Amino acid sequence: MPNLILLPQASPLTRSPESSGERKVFLFLQGPNCTFFRGVSEKLIGLGHTCLKISLCAGESFYWGGPSIHYRGSYKEWGSFLSKILQQEKITDIVLNGDQRLYHKVAVRLAQERNIRVAVTDFAYLRPDWITLESRGTLGNSGIPKSLPVIRAMASALELPDLRALFNDNGLRFALSEAVSGVTTWFFKPLYYGYRPFGIHHPILHGLAFVRTYIKKKFSSPLTK
């Protein structure tokens, strides 16, 4: 998985408490099926901030690899549970991958009601080896302008980014990481009996869906170049 995160220099995630005068408490929710969120949390802790994690299923707990709050309740109870965590732990920021997932929609709404900052990550939104981070969300909720002249005007005021490919990924590695997450989640499903997946949750069906997508791209890519 790519590890590069696209952040403006003035982003709160890039400042230490000593430089900003503010010590933050970050809550990590569902992330990509890799160790990216764990790496980000380690950097933030190194800067003097506090990081917490809520695990909703075994797959994400596997890639997090550290202590976390294991939520085993129902989706219906998720909002009240999360509200208590936000208040008790004095959460200042929530980090999540994809704002359209079931649990994340509730988290974003609660965060907005409490003026808690939300950082939404996504893969390859701008470039294959970049992970973008936005405050409003992705897709239709993205804050990226839709107007080409506006984008060009903004770009003219910025320095040229380093466009070297720093991280490589491939279909096989991506498929394996998804398989590990799917099998782990499915095998340990009794431990997270209330979990409601946001997509195909059976590992075999999930794998077949990726195979179909991979084959489709193999045949269509030469036609779109």
Image (tube, grey):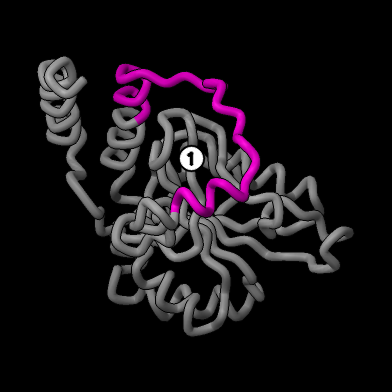
Picture quadrant where residue 26 is located:
bottom right
Q: For the point 31% across and 55% down, which residue is it?
A: 139
Q: Residues within 10 Å of mark 1 (few under 14, many from 20)?
A: many
Please tell me which residue lies in front, 103 or 13.
13
Rendered view: 83 above or below 167: below
Q: Does residue 134 appear anywhere in the picture?
A: yes
Please tell me which residue lies in front, 197 or 118.
118
Q: Does residue 69 appear anywhere in the picture?
A: no
**Residue wearing tag 1:** 131
Task: Point out the residue furthest to the right here.
Answer: 18
> Looking at numbered disc 1 in the image, what kind of residue is underneath it?
Ile
Q: Does the magenta-highlighted stretch encompass residue 157?
A: yes
**Residue 8 picture location, percent across and down:** 63, 51
Q: Secondary structure beneath disc 1?
A: strand
Rendered view: 32 above or below 194: above
Please tell me which residue lies in front, 154 or 57.
154
Task: Point out the residue furthest to the bottom here.
Answer: 113
User: Which residue range is magenta in the image?
Assistant: 151-177
Quarter holding the N terminus? top left
Relative placement, left or right, of 125 versus 133 is left
**Residue 196 picture location, percent across and down:** 25, 59
Q: For the point 48% across and 40% down, which residue is it?
A: 131
Q: For the point 56% across and 34% down, which residue is it?
A: 4
